[in-house]
């Protein structure tokens, strides 16, 4: 008979799997869609609009807002920790190797925004233009889950490339949220939040740092960021980014790695599914599916997530590798980036968040959310097909065409291939 500690360890390990995260997100989104379009849809709306929290602290928020502003900050803390680790000790540590995925991420954000803006502007829907950033985001959890399931047999550097691209994508999305989707700022509260993050940065480096010390400080930083008018998830990223990425005080592992292992199960099992549940519940009973999907905002989002991402990621990568000395990482060819580009078209979590911040009316918001679900679903299906086709195709000895034979790399879901 297994001990409770053993069972908890196995559960934690399962919740850290990329496939688990993707499955839980799908279940939560499907449940929301079914409930929001059932005879009990009023119950879903009432639950989403239920207000809880202390009014004296300006935290009397609806459950849907708590999910987007509060729980999602946990997810962004994990993103911040991952970003810090990649910059200090991972794929972003060496600028020359990181340059191609970073530039690909920029191309994969810029072109979808341009395509969206052109489509919506051409339709004359001026209020819809505020959603230009919706198709720019990439959902790390979903993208890595699809790669883990359907990319078996492909070289592991492909996962590193996708992770680097997606992390940079999320970082830029956070900057976009902070700069373009902040209506007004309370300077005093913002300074207070940043000062609290600085206190957290000092505490998290001490030998005696414990969760019961760090969590209250993090909550204060989050609350002040929310009060400042900046989207509170930015606090999550900043808090994650100040965690030390190298082993300190004689510890055998970095705190970025340890904290990521501790917090990811909470993000996977609670934060992301609950956010998806409250955000993906688009009711198509009123306007109707066809009416919503035909909205200029919907067309712009779907075109941006599929066409914009593919052309942006592949086009920038092709130009960079042909016109400059930069090359793809060892073991990866340009053909491998077809499915990767499609995976970046899975916007979901961050796209849904930006959709909520972009519009004040239900028609635009519902149209954008429905388009995100449809566009992300199409991108995921096409990516799965391309991954399997790529994995079955023969590989050359020099996939990145740098004149040096590729080394024998571990493969996704296996041992090695070279």
Image: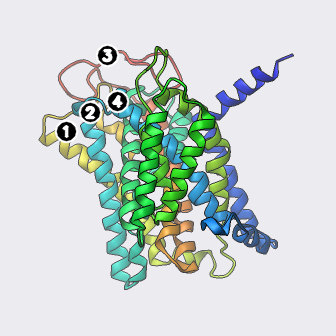
Q: Is residue 233 left or right of residue 112?
A: right
Q: Are marks 2 and 1 in contact (CB under 8 Å)?
A: yes
Q: Which residue is mark 4?
A: 88
Residue lying at the far bottom of the rendered structure? 124
Q: Secondary structure at mark 2?
A: loop
Q: Residue at x 54, y 27 (%)?
A: 258
Which badge, 4 or 3, is on the more N-terminal residue? 4
Which badge, 3 or 1, is on the more N-terminal residue? 1
Labels 4, 2: front one: 4
Q: Residues within 10 Å of mark 3 (few under 14, many from 20)?
A: few
Res. 337 image quadrant: top left
**Position of residue 289 measured from the top left corner of the image (x, y, whole percent):** 61, 74
Along the line of sight, which residue is nearer the eye, 181 or 115?
Answer: 181
Q: Split into 4 quadrants, where in the image is the N terminus?
A: top right
Q: Which residue is mark 1?
A: 321
Residue 407, label in figure: 3
Q: Residues under labels 3 and 1: Cα distance?
A: 20 Å
Q: Split into 4 quadrants, where in the image is the C terminus?
A: top left
Q: Secondary structure at mark 1?
A: helix
**Position of residue 167 measured from the top left corner of the image (x, y, whole percent):** 40, 43
**Position of residue 407 measured from the top left corner of the image (x, y, whole percent):** 31, 16
Which badge, 2 or 3, is on the more N-terminal residue? 2
Q: Is residue 7 left or right of residue 114?
A: right
Along the line of sight, which residue is nearer the eye, 236 or 311?
Answer: 236
Q: Which residue is mark 2?
A: 328
Along the line of sight, which residue is nearer the eye, 287 or 113?
Answer: 113
């Amino acid at each position: 008979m297994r001990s409770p500690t053993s069972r908890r360890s196995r559960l934690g390990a399962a919740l850290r799997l990329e496939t688990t995260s993707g499955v839980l997100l799908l279940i939560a989104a499907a449940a929301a869609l079914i409930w929001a379009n059932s005879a009990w849809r009023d119950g879903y709306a009432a639950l989403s609009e239920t207000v809880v929290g202390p009014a004296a602290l300006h935290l009397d928020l609806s459950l849907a807002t708590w999910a987007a502003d509060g729980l999602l900050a946990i997810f962004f803390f994990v993103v911040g920790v991952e970003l810090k680790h990649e910059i200090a000790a991972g794929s972003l540590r060496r600028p020359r190797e990181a340059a191609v995925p970073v530039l690909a991420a920029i191309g994969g954000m810029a072109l979808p925004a341009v395509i969206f803006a052109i489509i919506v502007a051409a339709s004359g829907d001026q209020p819809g233009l505020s959603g230009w950033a919706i198709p720019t985001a990439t959902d790390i959890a979903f993208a890595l889950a699809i790669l883990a399931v359907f990319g078996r047999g492909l070289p592991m550097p492909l996962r590193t490339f996708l992770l680097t691209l997606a992390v940079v994508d999320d970082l830029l999305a956070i900057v976009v949220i902070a700069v373009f989707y902040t209506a007004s700022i309370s300077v005093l509260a913002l300074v207070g939040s940043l000062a609290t993050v600085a206190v957290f940065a000092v505490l998290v480096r001490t030998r005696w740092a414990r969760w019961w010390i760090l969590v209250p400080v993090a909550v204060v930083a989050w609350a002040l960021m929310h009060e400042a008018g900046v989207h509170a998830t930015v606090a999550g990223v900043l808090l994650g980014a100040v965690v030390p990425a190298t082993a300190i005080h004689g510890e055998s592992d970095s705190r970025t790695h340890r904290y990521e292992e501790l917090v990811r199960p909470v993000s996977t099992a609670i934060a992301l599914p609950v956010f998806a549940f409250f955000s993906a519940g688009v009711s198509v009973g009123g306007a109707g599916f066809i009416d919503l999907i035909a909205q200029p905002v919907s067309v712009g989002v779907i075109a941006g997530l599929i066409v914009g991402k593919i052309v942006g990621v592949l086009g920038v990568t092709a130009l960079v590798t042909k016109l400059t000395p930069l090359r793809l990482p060892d073991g990866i060819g340009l053909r491998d980036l077809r499915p990767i580009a499609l995976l970046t078209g899975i916007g979901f979590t961050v796209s849904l968040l930006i959709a909520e911040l972009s519009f004040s009316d239900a028609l635009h918001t519902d149209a954008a959310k429905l388009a995100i679900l449809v566009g992300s679903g199409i991108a995921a299906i096409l990516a799965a097909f391309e991954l399997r086709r790529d994995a079955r195709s023969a590989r050359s000895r020099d996939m990145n065409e740098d004149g040096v034979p590729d080394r024998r790399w571990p493969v996704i879901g296996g041992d090695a291939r070279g």
